[in-house]
Image (cartoon, grey):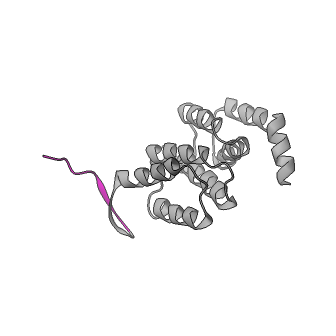
């Protein structure tokens, strides 16, 4: 007998919880930049109720890695969504634990440099408390020549 997957009621009907991760993974497997309209659809799907799970957050990191020339909507969504997950959805809220900070730094370091730094800086800006080493790690990344060069290009 096949076990039914967990489900939730959403604005779009009843969805299996793993369908959202599968949707993000399929976008990553396509290996292309998302259009602004696709980012808006993804935003609606993920923010309609409780936000994202750790598995979905991991899938968003994977999706970011295939974005070689992302639209501005993607970067804004990515930073906002993962900050929300790390700061406000993980318990206790507003506090970034050492384990969560280690995971964020490890994954952010595998993203495009400016996106990774933007995420880490935004997490620090929103968190009530974070490990002191995370502040030092973000400062060190901001000073990296490739980050400074990319920031100068975007200015």
User: Relative to residue 39, is residue 4 depicted above or below?
Assistant: above
Q: Is residue 2 magenta?
A: yes
Q: Is residue 140 magenta?
A: no
User: Relative to residue 148, is residue 75 depicted above or below?
Assistant: below
Q: Residue at x 39, y 70 (%)?
A: 11
Residue 12 appearing in the image: yes
Q: Residue at x 17, y 47 (%)?
A: 2
* Range drawn in magenta: 1-10
Q: Nearer the viewer, residue 126 or 76?
A: 76
**Relative horizontal placement of residue 143, taking residue 62 as reference (left or right):** right
Quarter assignment of residue 97 = top right
Most prominent secondary structure in the magenta stretch?
loop
Q: Residue at x 62, y 65 (%)?
A: 36
Query: Residue 89: image x %, image y %?
Result: 50, 49
Q: Residue at x 41, y 51 (%)?
A: 22
Residue 143 appearing in the image: no
User: Relative to residue 10, is residue 32 depicted above or below?
Assistant: above
Name the outermost residue toward the left: 1
- The total of numbered circles placed on residues is 0
């Amino acid at each position: 007998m096949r076990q039914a997957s967990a489900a939730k009621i959403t604005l779009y009907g009843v969805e299996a919880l793993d369908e959202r991760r599968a949707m993000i993974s399929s976008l990553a497997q396509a290996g292309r930049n998302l259009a602004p309209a696709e980012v808006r659809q993804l935003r609606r799907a993920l923010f309609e109720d409780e936000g994202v799970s750790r598995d979905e957050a991991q899938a968003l990191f994977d999706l970011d890695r295939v974005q070689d020339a992302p639209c501005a909507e993607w970067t804004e969504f990515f930073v906002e969504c993962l900050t929300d997950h790390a700061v406000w959805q993980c318990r206790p809220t507003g506090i970034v634990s050492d384990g969560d900070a280690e995971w964020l730094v490890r994954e952010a370091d595998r993203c495009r440099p400016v996106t990774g730094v933007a995420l880490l800086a935004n997490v620090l800006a929103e968190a009530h408390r974070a490990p002191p080493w995370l502040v030092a790690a973000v400062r060190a990344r901001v000073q990296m020549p490739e980050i400074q060069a990319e920031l100068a290009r975007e200015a």
